[in-house]
Amino acid sequence: MLTRRIIPCLDVKNGRIVKGVQFKDLRDAGDPVAAAKLYQDQGADELVILDITATVENRMATLSLVHDVRQVLTIPLTVGGGVRSLADVQALLNVGADKVSLNSAALAQPDLISQVAKAYGRQCTVVAIDAKDGKVFTRAGHDATAWDVTAWAKQAEQLGAGEILLTSMNRDGQQSGYDTDLLRAVSGSVAIPVIASGGAGQLPDFLAALQAGASAVLAASLFHDGILSIPDVKTYLSQAGQEIRP
Amino acid sequence: MSRDVCILSSGVANIASMAACLKRLGCTVSYAETAQDIADAPALAVPGVGTFGVAMQTLTDRGWTDALRARILSGQKTLMICLGMQILCAGSDESPGVAGLGVIDATVKKLNTQKLPVPQMGWNLMSPARLPSALISSEGDYVYFANSYALPAVGLESLQADDGWQLSTFAYGDDAAYPYVAMLRRQGVMACQFHPELSGKAGEGLIQQWLEGALC
């Protein structure tokens, strides 16, 4: 059986991790390469890197960072943040991304999803959705759109998305659990995999997200701060009867 | 043992992961530019991204189809990944009417499931395990898949019995008794539906076996 995926997420800026990774065994907590390697060794099933900068000069730092991470990373890598064009996608793939996550640009220009899927395949095309109170938000959660979350998810799927990275803005950083109602609604309305993001705080939260239909669970600060480790989550889920890669 | 590996780039595949993986294993990587490169490469890797039709069209446009088929038939060291494995077949439901390399006389089908997400995205078990035993004990024989189409294993018994292909399968879908081909190996050819270059230590172990010509 296909296993459910546990995905750590690195938020980067200027080629460094923000939202610090506080592992005591990492000499440089801001070094994405060291963090990627550590998560991989701990059994991460994939890695997501989100570039939270948008300027051109910082973009080059991100490409260099993705390249450096790729040299040590033996698992799949999704990169998102500020991807606006087919050229941006190609640039990320050239340095070692396996999948690219589209967000604001896809909302502004939905055809971008089709273009990426057609050129690189559905499996490469992730659409990230920032959801708040049932609506889709754009520009890193700054602006509300008219899109209902499930309607946009369906539209993204139809345009060629191979996966939805669904972040609950209501829950993000709260560590009060994933938004299982949102996950149930979205995963029930699309046939592509849905990655749960935003709100993980305790072990049962991961199980609840998977039971609500998520194919994968993503977390950032929970792992970075060492509150829970990937092996903790995997052991728990495995004992709870979920299919998990050892 | 040669450590020179030539990558056949279709122009759109994410070959950086493949190249990084080969470099970690100590290989020197080059890229195919001519049919002669494809014929002569001591080891050739064919990563596949995109659709069946586009991949075959690219090979045809560049005049590479015959050289690739010939090296697979003669058992030269060739690694075919994901769509790269699928184009070994006669055709695919993904691109009706497009002829594949025809090395395997079968048709690639859409994953048959109503309940599970498509594409299949993630780590699934390959059976029987083909990894060195040291790796099986540590990480299991889980490998990373990202595909909507696959080659059904049902009815392919003659591939193993008569044609000398060694077969491993994976299960995905509503019917566990309907497995798909995860990997095909014969002589120097290793064709994987999954991505060994993204499959952690297990995948690196498989590529290492392929490089050493020590397929077990």
Image: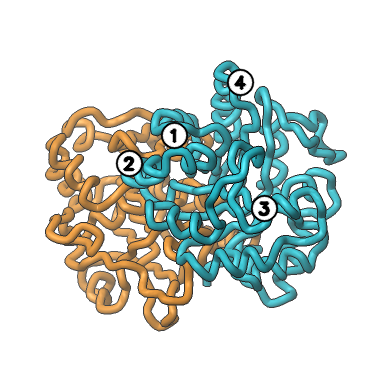
Chain colours: A cyan, B orange
Task: Name which of mark 1 and mark 4 comes first in the sequence.
Answer: 4
- Of helix, strand and loop, which one carries label 3? strand
Q: Residue at x 24, y 54 (%)?
A: B87
- Quadrant including the C terminus of chain B: bottom left
Label of residue A6 in the image: none
- Quadrant including the N terminus of chain B: top left
* Residue A73 appears in view: yes
- Of helix, strand and loop, which one carries label 2? helix
Compare residues B125 and B27 and report the one nearer the observer: B125
Q: Is residue A88 above or below residue B79?
A: above
Say which amino acid is labelled 1: Val
Q: Nearer the viewer, mark 3 or mark 4?
A: 3
Q: Are the residues under badges 1 and 3 in a single subunit? A: yes
Task: Name which of mark 2 and mark 1 comes first in the sequence.
Answer: 1
Residue under circle 4? A58
In the shown orientation, is residue B136 left or right of residue B126? Answer: right
Residue under circle 3? A132
Q: Position of residue B177 (x, y in %)?
A: 40, 83
Q: CA distance from mark 2 to mark 1?
A: 10 Å
Q: Residues within 10 Å of mark 1 (few under 14, many from 20)?
A: many
In the shown orientation, is residue A236 left or right of residue B106? Answer: right
Q: Position of residue B200 (x, y in %)?
A: 56, 50
Say which amino acid is labelled 3: Lys
Q: Chain of mark 4?
A: A
Compare residues B25 and B34 and report the one nearer the observer: B34
Task: Name which of mark 3 and mark 4 comes first in the sequence.
Answer: 4
Compare residues A212 and A68 and report the one nearer the observer: A212
Residue under circle 1? A89
Q: Is residue A86 above or below residue B55?
A: above
Q: Is residue B135 above or below residue B7?
A: below
Image marks 3 and 2: residues in contact by CB distance under 8 Å: no
Say which amino acid is labelled 4: Asn
